[in-house]
Image: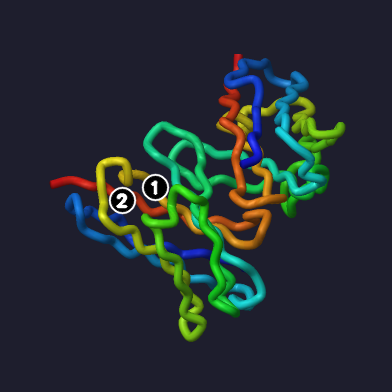
Amino acid sequence: DIQMTQSPASLSASLEEIVTITCQASQDIGNYLSWYQQKPGKSPQLLIHSATSLADGVPSRFSGSRSGTQYSLKINRLQVEDTGIYYCLQHYSAPWTFGGGTKLELK
Amino acid sequence: EVQLQQSGPEVGRPGSSVKISCKASGYTFTDYVMNWVKQSPGQGLEWIGWIDPEYGSTDYAEKFKKKATLTADTSSNTAYIQLSSLTSEDTATYFCARRWELDYWGQGVMVTVSS
């Protein structure tokens, strides 16, 4: 199975700060990488698909990038509504696997 | 508007089975696979498997092959997951999610296993 190592596990940041979350894949997954935000008691929401493509309706302060087998989610100018838990997902090879999650809080 | 409407919370006794539904609307049901994802209380996300509603083909994560059965009814645009031989480890919220990249999700169904 492909392992997705996500870091950091938790993060505290200030309003307007730039935040970066990373996922390291244990092998090549191409661009078959998505990012999700989950708020308490809610279902996850797709933010980024195909490693770098912004999902419909997602604010442009979110962006995704790839360097080899390392994938990053960047949030420019952090807003109050950006708190929650973020997950990456690889759907290159079954079983699809999620990263362990990053809990993002406001400082 | 794409919507995935899941059934209500379930309580199952140890050793029994439960069946959860996910009714799709706002798109052609047979155009995309439907995934199922498990989230245990306070934990992360775990992929269970997918079903292609058009052909009925499925794929499962190894640990769910004897636990979950995925089906789909194209006449009602509804996907189902049946969980069998319930144990306390099956207490969790179960989500359905559309397409390979899981672009739309249902609201989740809480399954509680309790005697």
The chain carrying label 2 is B
Q: CA distance from mark 2 to mark 1?
A: 6 Å
> What residue do we see at 79% from left, 49% from top?
A50
Crowding near pointer 1: few (<14 within 10 Å), some, many (20+)? many
> What residue do we see at 39% from left, 47% from top?
B93
Q: Amino acid at mark 1?
A: Thr
As displayed, is residue A45 above or below residue A19?
below
> What residue do we see at 48% from left, 74% from top?
B72
Q: Position of residue A54 (x, y in %)?
A: 78, 47
> Seen in the image, is A89 located left or right of residue A60?
left
> What residue do we see at 48% from left, 44% from top?
A42
Say yes or no: labels 2 and 1 on the same chain.
yes
> Seen in the image, is A90 located left or right of residue B51?
right
Q: Position of residue A9 (x, y in %)?
A: 59, 21
- Label 1: which residue? B93
| Quarter that holds the N terminus of chain A | top right
A63 vs B43, nearest the viewer? B43
The tag earlier along the polypeptide, 2 or 1, is: 1
Q: Residue A52: give its label.
A: none
Q: Residue B111: give its label.
A: 2
| Quarter that holds the C terminus of chain A | top right
Q: Are marks 2 and 1 in contact (CB under 8 Å)?
A: yes
A5 vs A35, nearest the viewer? A5
